[in-house]
Image: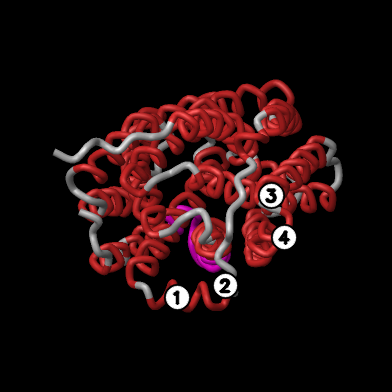
Amino acid sequence: MPQKPKIANKNRHSLIILYFLGLLLAVSTALPAYAQSNFLGEFVSFQMVSLFFVIANALTVLAIGFFPKIIEKITNYFTAKAVIILYGTALLGLTLSTTTSLALISIILLTITTNLIWINMDVLVENFSANAITGRIRTVYMTFINAGWIFSPLLTSFLIGKGEYTLTFLVAGFLVIPFFLIFIRVSKNLKIKTNYSRISFKTVIKKTWQNKNLRGIFFIALLLQLFYSSAVVYVPLYLHQNLQMDWGTLGIIFSIMLIPFMVLEIPAGIIADKYLGEKEILTTGIAILAISLFLFFYIKVPTAWVWALVLFLSRIGGALVEAMRETYFFKQVDAKDIGYINLFRMTGPLAYIIGPGLAILILAFFPLNYLFLFLSIIMLTGFGFIASLKDTK
């Protein structure tokens, strides 16, 4: 009988450190996430908020494109230190923002560094992972991150009530300090010398397109990020400004809706590793996302329990797709494949270009809720991408 794969003690210790760092970073990045669209709405119009997110994420895509070369040159560890300092600077800039220009510059820097630091974390976690237990390692890691996201909406709504948006960015900035200190303290554990695959970004794109597994999971990841872009940017806008729901209520609803990420991802990862593989779980998740987005469009009443239920349902789908996205992709690559990891994480900013770009078009002709209808239809393409994947079981 084959032995159950285990994690070496040294790797387990390093992973525990990374799980905790992921939790701290998640709280810090989640606090401004739900507030930034409404914060920008105080300076510019809805349409301009969408345009600005397109610009900020286009610059992020460019930054990610250059990121592998920087990591290869000065190592992932030292790159992460530099990025986290810039991330803290962006939050300080938002705290001090009294003019449109400073707010916009700070949001751009925040958008870029938020994406880059999670790539650094991906590489660190992958250094201590083995394919046979990738599902468990990645979903435990994602559960720690999602724990940070669960409590953040409540904290965000409380902070906005006390000091408007400034206090939210200030608290997020303070959380950078313990993250940075721990990161330096455990540097011995995290300074892994990796021989990265020296491959051009153009070649990475070409090989990803030619590999049906990488291509399929890339587009599934892009669909999930499209859902997140609507959930983070436009659902708070729609509920707060269109349906007139207050931040106290929204904070409770947004915390409740994130519970599936805590309770579903680890079991889904174990099931994918030991029993089913990923395709069946991905199919279920995409179907739930498509239905949920249609309900976002259809429901026009500001009833808290109705929205709590629908948003909770949507995150069941999101949790299942996210768990399988992480599990499947990181079974295909290793830490040395930094180019592929960068391209994979580029789905985030790409979605924040496509989503707001689509919103600009839709808002020119339809009310905001029609964005959710269009995204629901787009989500159905996920079934074709899932069919193209070769299951790992």
Does the magenta-highlighted stretch encompass residue 365? Answer: yes
The residue labelled by disc 2 is 199
| Residue 299 at x, y percent in the picture | 36, 44
Looking at the rendering, which quadrant does residue 32 occupy? top right
Residue 372 vs 377, above or below: the answer is above
Tell me the element at label 1: helix
- Sequence-earlier tag: 1 or 4: 4
Which of the labelled discs sits on residue 113, or is there none?
3
Q: Residue at x 18, y 40 (%)?
A: 2
Left or right of 41 on screen, residue 250? left
Task: Estimate how packed mark 1 is, as few (under 14), some (14 to 19) or many (20 or more) residues with alpha carbons within 10 Å.
Answer: some
- Sequence-earlier tag: 1 or 3: 3
What's the amino acid at mark 4? Lys
- Real-space Cα distance between discs 2 and 4? 14 Å
- Real-space Cα distance between discs 1 and 4? 23 Å
Mark 1 against mark 4, which lies toward the viewer? 4
Left or right of 112 on screen, residue 270? left
| Residue 255 at x, y percent in the picture | 46, 28
| Residue 168 at x, y percent in the picture | 69, 30
Q: Residue at x 74, y 25 (%)?
A: 163
